[in-house]
Amino acid sequence: VFVIACSNVANLILARSVRREGELAVRAALGAGPGALRRTLLAESLVLCGAGAVLGVVLAQPLVAMVSRYAARFSVRALEVTVDPGMLWIATGLAMAAAVLLAYVPRLPSSHAPAGLGLTSGSVRITPGTNRRLRIFATTQIAFSFVLLAGAGMLLAALVSMQTAQTGYDMRQVLAFNIPASATGLGDAKAIAFYQEATRRISGLPGVEGVAVGSFVPWRDAGDLGPGFLFTVDGYTPADGEENPRGRMRMVAPRFFAVLGVPLVAGRDFTDDDRRGSELVTIVSQSVAQRLFPNGDAVNRHLTWTDPVFSIWKPLPSRIVGVVADVDDENVVPGPAMTIYQPAWQVGVAGRLFVHAAGDPYALVTPVTR
């Protein structure tokens, strides 16, 4: 955008210099040297670019606020967008650098030809050098305009895809909080007690429809756990040369699926009774059930992790108690998702807190944090 603007201004300055060549020629004839003429042009371009920079700085804050309010319809985090002071200084510096550069665009009259821009008998003609520079600036502007249009088209296509994608989640009123392990402990009884107490207290706040903890914020945490882990299920035998299937491991607490709007297809959700010392249980996505079990009947079957990463301890089989709809938390435009959900109260690991708000989610940030 900056290059397009500069090439446009350079074109205008070059065209204007052709019209004012008589003035420059008279100044040269009266004794103004190249330095004096160039300083005059520099002062003019500094005033022009300085005024443009000041106008840009003045307009930046209200325009960014307007755009962020519009974008907040799609993500509450858009309200956090502000004008960056460092970027303003960079933009202002570029404007001043452009002013210096633009001062050297017009060609000055020479001492041998005061009417060096092409003044002959009161008529104006564009010299070959001026015409060449006009073509260069025009070509530059058109080329960068095509690049800008292509980028804008790609951005618009991505926005349309994101808005029309059926993700399977209902995240419009959901806040996601990070809960560092330093505050909760890692995988021990203290961590579980912290999550349960936080869930209980936040559930009682006005304007809260649901609270749950989990280990993974959809899309934002994409790629954090790699391609998934190897597992096997009752009655499934891989073909010759085929490894066991891979599944994404996610730790979730009771009511997680209700808070994020993921429907339960079969079986039951996790409950507060699914804790350490009780029967090991698991919930799987619909892709796992349909691919690995006849007729998708996965409830009450057993699943075991076989990935080498678990070789430090021998994973025990866990009973599948539920099947949930496929949701792809790695990609906004969803694909098949082989996902396996473990109960957070048994594993003791979560790290993310999800709060479903009845009204404005941002009104809950302060009370939830407190």
Image (tube, rainbow, N blue to C red):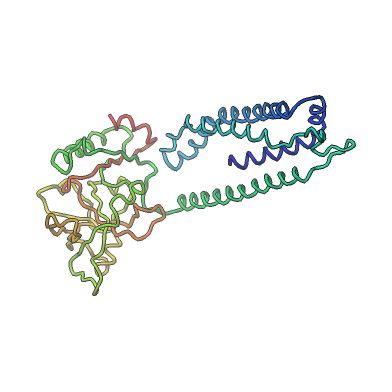
Q: Which of 104 and 72 is in front in this view?
A: 104
Q: Quadrant of the N terminus?
A: top right
Which residue occupies 82% across, 35% down?
Answer: 115
Percent across and percent down for residue 89 are 51, 30
* Image label count: 0
203 vs 36, left or right, is left
Q: In this view, does 143 lie above or below 122?
A: below
Residue 7: x and y in percent read 65, 41
Residue lying farthest to the left in this orientation: 277
Nearest to the observer: residue 111 or residue 294: 111
Residue 304 vertical placement versus 14 (above, below): below
Measured from the top left, where is residue 8 in percent x and y? 67, 40
Image position of 34 (left or right of 345):
right
Task: Give the image quarter of residue 78.
Answer: top left
Above or below residue 46? Residue 304 is below
Which residue corresponds to the image point at 24% horizontal and 58% vertical from the top-left? Answer: 229
Which residue occupies 75% across, 42% down?
Answer: 130
In which quadrant will I find the C terminus?
Answer: top left
> Looking at the image, which is closer to me, 308 or 183?
308
For residue 86, side relative to residue 237 (left or right): right
